[in-house]
Amino acid sequence: MATEIAVRKALIEANSWHADKILGTLAFVRPLDDPCIRTHDAFGKGDISYPKLAPKQSPFGSLPRLNDLRKTLIREIIGKEEDRLDDGDSDGISLFNTSTGAEETILLLQNITNPSYTSAIPSMNPFFTTISGLQVELPDDFSHMMAITEEATIVIAPSNHLLELQHTNESYTYTTMMTGQVIWFVWPPTTHNLDCLKMGYEMFESDRRKADANIIKLLEYGVTFVQEKGDCVRLPPFCVILALSTNTTVLAKTSAITGGSFIQGLSNIPLLEAWWKTEVGGAKKRHDFFSALTWQIRMILSDDVEAFSTKDLEPPISLSDPLPSLLKSWDDVKAGFMSIMNVQDREDIMARLVELLRRCKGNSCFICGKSFGKSKARMNVEAHISQHHWVERDK
Ligand SMILES: [Zn+2]
């Protein structure tokens, strides 16, 4: 029960106004290091599916000193904002957190070495930014899977910031704590949990806090732990999380998308649609997600098919690599992503899919196994895709 004691201790010392919610949540979860078998299994097969807290798994070679980071970020942010205003874009989307504005963001950045800095705005969003020059090397967890690594970001949250109940995205994420302390609650991505969360997002429009409190009681197989300076946390995709920063917190974060997690992302578009409606700047997040998704699909379809052995692309297809995974799941998930693509994207994806299927060995379609007929001429392949593997846009 060491973890549970650590969570309570961190909470009492923090003297947080979110204490009631966090203490109430403790009754519904188990310590991360002492799960029952059912809890462990609910997260999925293999250790990679279970959240892990360990300094040694940090994928970052070296991280900048906090003082240097502070100077760099303030300089960059002020510069970018000035450029935006110089361009006459005063009505556009600010690079600063939309809910907080420039002054609060600068104050937060100035205070990253002050452990007890709290924002005057209780619901202030954490500050996210990408940072160049961070060396990232994923641990061996992914050595047997082809993974796309995403850009490293720095996340900064004031002390006593509550990250409301929400899902993690379609990646395996690694966060290494540069300073601060966070109490985490993590629930596995079971169908039940994701359905409950979707319901919570839909209820949100009336009352977020009430919705969260009701949903937490329904969630199953959750775990809790405390992350401190130097600790690295690995979370699997589409978990349900709740987190409280008890000190001013700076995290370095990176993530990896594998074939399996990518398909999970495509399958969870209805959950995401419910979530975007609850978010400040949700329309922009939705747009960014689909841009990234289209880019990922394009990249996967452009992959050199020769890099896979023909066996990888023959049924039963392994779900460990993005390309076989995408082809295998294409018919199940195509409606979700095609509905949001613009005409150009759709033409481009079609061209890449035709090219890919033409390059595959033999004369049958690697999505459904049907024969292309007399030949794999472009026309035949295109006709087959249009007929069997495409979704027309709503007129
Ligand atoms: Zn087919």
Image (tube, rainbow, N blue to C red):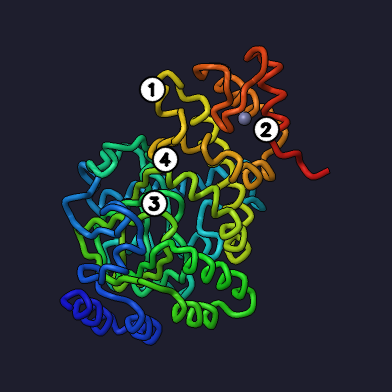
Graded by Cα atoms within 10 Å as few (under 14), some (14 to 19) or many (20 or more), the crowding at tag 2 reads: some
- Image: 53 above or below 63: below
Q: Three-letter amino acid code at disc 2?
A: Arg
Q: Three-letter amino acid code at disc 3?
A: Ile
- Image: 194 above or below 79: below
- Image: 300 above or below 381: below
> Is 82 left, or right, of 182 in this rendering?
right
Residue identified by numbered label 2: 346
Query: Which of marks 2 and 1 precedes in the sequence?
Result: 1
CA gap between label 2 and label 3 equals 40 Å
CA gap between label 4 and label 2 equals 24 Å
Tag nearer the camera, 1 or 3? 1
Q: Three-letter amino acid code at disc 1?
A: Ser
Q: Is mark 4 within 8 Å of ligand 1?
A: no
Q: Residue at x 39, y 21 (%)?
A: 307
Q: Secondary structure at mark 2?
A: helix
CA gap between label 1 and label 2 equals 28 Å
Query: Which of marks 2 and 4 precedes in the sequence?
Result: 4
Query: Which of marks 3 and 2 precedes in the sequence?
Result: 3
Pinpoint residue 44: horizontal percent, then vertical percent.
35, 57
CA gap between label 4 and label 1 equals 14 Å
Residue identified by numbered label 4: 319
Residue identified by numbered label 3: 74
Q: Secondary structure at mark 1?
A: loop
